Image: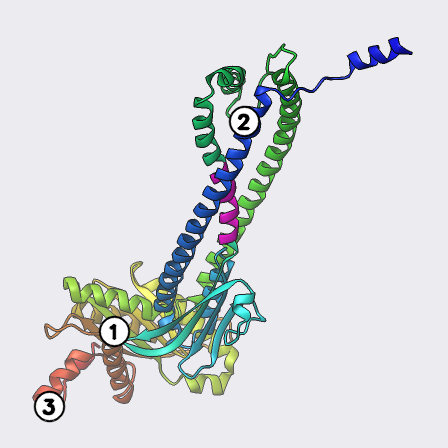
Amino acid sequence: MTALTAEHALKMPRFRFGVRQKVLLVLLTVLLVALSVSGWMALREEKANLLKEIDQRGSYIGRFVAKALAYSVVGYDYHTIQLLLDELTAAQEIDYAKVTNAKGNTMGESGSAALDIDTEQAAKEGLVMFTHDIRIDNERVGTLYLGLSTAHIMERLENQKFALLKRESLIILLIALGEFLALSYIIIRPVGKITDFLRRNVDDDGLLVSDIPMVSNDEFGQLAQQFNTLGNQLNEANKKLQSKIESADRRLLETNQQLKQLNDEFKLLSITDPLTGLFNRRHFDEIMETEVGLSNRHGDPNSILLIDIDHFKGINDTYGHYVGDLVLKSMTKLLQDNLRHTDAICRIGGEEFAVLCKRADKAGAMEIAEKLRSVVEATPMAPETDDELMITISVGVASVPYNAKNVSPKQLYKDVDTAMYYSKNNGRNRVTHISDLYQEDSTDTEPTENECSRG
């Protein structure tokens, strides 16, 4: 019985609370206290910096978005406002966005639908609310409400917590171990061997290419053995994760390509007339804004043709709207076949068409307009019908620059509209340039046929 007890006692590990254990205990105590105090102070400072950052970022985003939305609010472009708000709330930082007009009516809202910005619900939702006036020429036209999430702050603080612990532990560990060289020699030397092996045996993908060679029977030998086991498991998990990432990247790339294609199609639809396929009035205004601005700055000539089909209402009343649509399509093809590739053709609405003749002065524009008038007069329309339908057009022309003055797009369109109606009110089937009408006003005489019409 005594022999068995002695044999059993030899097999049981003997625990001794020696110098190494005491030093490790003191070192761990110092580390824990130092890390707790240092980490707590650093996290408080980091939290203050992050809150300051989100306040500055919220103000900047609010000013930028309010400026971008100004013209959409004035133009009651609900669709554009909602698209922009949806893009904002799709970002990680912004959880709530809302736009109201000057009367307080909501024009767009996205994000936390149940959020009531007039209550303390925003704070409960973890949001920091920002309010910015939407202004044009210092006149308030609406209000923008943004709710920035603080969730990412907590996430960053959590990440900072572990990063600070690691950094502070290394600093304090080096100081403590510097006072205990003997213990450092015992601990750091095998750790250095393991670290050096890992540095030389980890590939670009972070995988261990071989096991740690450790033959000692102490704690470091056990650590190496456990690390090798864990490394093999991590290698397998890393390979599986990499495969999933590659598959997700492929699906994301395909989705992005589809979204880009849809976005291009939506953009084309937003600037295109559905019946004729020409640019619509909205895109025509954008082209006018750009080209007239270039003409005013650099002096390059540009001309606008405003074309109206004569007696178009009679066509619809006599033949029906189906034939009227065929006439509009035939007119579209005729314009495309007889204009330059650089000219922009737009359907303004109804039976009116506009043509921006780039780099065309008055003489060039009048020549183009007269050519169109003659071709339309001689070309049967609606060839799909049994009747040979003939039409004429009245054309107004305006050119920039003229009178050595800058002309706004609004004024230029008003001028070409005046010239077109002069053609309609003076016999139709003719071309009139606005400058000829200005000359008539200055001389108080009736303009001649050559001044108002070519042919």
The residue mark sitting in front, 1 or 2, is 2
Vertical arrangement, residue 91 with respect to residue 347, above or below: above
Q: Position of residue 105 (x, y in %)?
A: 47, 81
Residue at the left extreme?
443
Disc 3 residue type (three-letter): Thr
Q: Position of residue 395 (x, y in %)?
A: 28, 78
Instruction: Please give the label number shown on residue 206.
Output: 2
Q: Nearer the viewer, residue 22 or 157?
A: 22
Q: Earlier in the sequence, mark 3 or mark 2?
A: 2
- What residue sits right under mark 1 in the picture? 409
| Magenta stretch secondary structure, dominant | helix
The crowd level at tag 1 (other Cα within 10 Å; few <14, some 14-19, many 20+) is: some
Is label 1 in contact with label 2 (beta carbons under 8 Å)?
no
- Residue 155 painted magenta: yes
- What residue sits right under mark 3 in the picture? 445
Badge 2 marks a residue whose secondary structure is: loop
Q: Quadrant of residue 373?
A: bottom left
- Residue 415 painted magenta: no
Q: Position of residue 208 (x, y in %)?
A: 58, 21
Disc 2 residue type (three-letter): Gly
Q: Is residue 305 visible?
A: yes
Quadrant where the N terminus is found in the figure: top right
